[in-house]
Image (spheres, grey):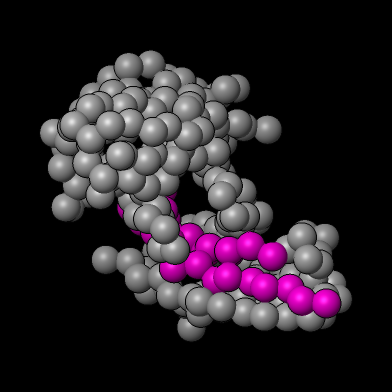
Amino acid sequence: GEDVEQSLFLSVREGDSSVINCTYTDSSSTYLYWYKQEPGAGLQLLTYIFSNMDMKQDQRLTVLLNKKDKHLSLRIADTQTGDSAIYFCAVPRGGYNKLIFGAGTRLAVHP
Amino acid sequence: GAVVSQHPSRVICKSGTSVKIECRSLDFQATTMFWYRQFPKQSLMLMATSNEGSKATYEQGVEKDKFLINHASLTLSTLTVTSAHPEDSSFYICSSLDSSGNTIYFGEGSWLTVV
């Protein structure tokens, strides 16, 4: 089965960059996703990357994919207090894109 | 863009009763939807895959007679928690692929509290 692992906690200072890491086991995944969950809320799709890409940039977000090492990272530039949330990486399993989630990384942004 | 809507967002029910959660795709047809459960401070766990017009496929360890899934139309899937117990209290969230087949969108989620 698919295993998706993330570090559980990250604390950064406002204005710094945040890097959230994720490793996975299944090499057949086509798209890999990052979701954001704010306290008491549902999931918000942040971005995704296709498996034949190494990098994708979307405003303050940069996704890096090392397919050889099965490592995915999300970089948030100029981190703001509003970025405080739990960030999940998710990897599809099987042909129907059932998502397997990491445990989530809780990002805390302090002044 | 694609929108997936869930209802209710919060529900409290008495132990032993049943509660239904709806998941709708608002501007696209969803032949397949997925139901997840998230316990406090834990990650999301896939419960079942809901297929329009056919039986749902349940993940290992999920009781199909307790969590009834109906996907009667291309825009609506429902999850009914039957004979609910306090340990069923959780955050339930559905998702679906959009029409391009590339992006997975989630509903807003439903908080279930069983008292």
Horizontal arrangement in the rendering, residue B20 relative to residue A55 (left or right): left
Q: Where is residue A108 drawn, in percent x and y?
A: 67, 73
Image position of A13 (left or right of B94) = right
Left or right: where B90 falls relative to B55 = right
Q: Quadrant of residue A13?
A: bottom right
Q: Is A77 in the magenta?
A: no
Span shown in magenta: A84-111
Look at the magenta stretch and give its main secondary structure.
strand
Q: Is residue B93 above or below residue A80?
A: above
Q: Quadrant of residue A28?
A: bottom left
Residue at x-position 55% and y-position 46%: A42
| Above or below: residue B27 compared with residue A8 | above
- Picture quarter containing residue A2? bottom left
- How far across and down, in percent of the image, does residue A27 sit? 40, 70
Q: B16 and A13: which one is in front?
A: B16
Q: Is residue A94 magenta?
A: yes
Tell me which residue sits at (57%, 22%) in the image: B26
Q: Position of residue A6 (x, y in %)?
A: 48, 75
Q: Give the x, y percent position of residue A20.
A: 61, 75
User: Looking at the image, which residue is at 30% across and 39% down?
Assistant: B115
- Which residue is painted at 28% across and 23% down in the image? B70
In the picture, which quadrant includes the N terminus of chain B? top right
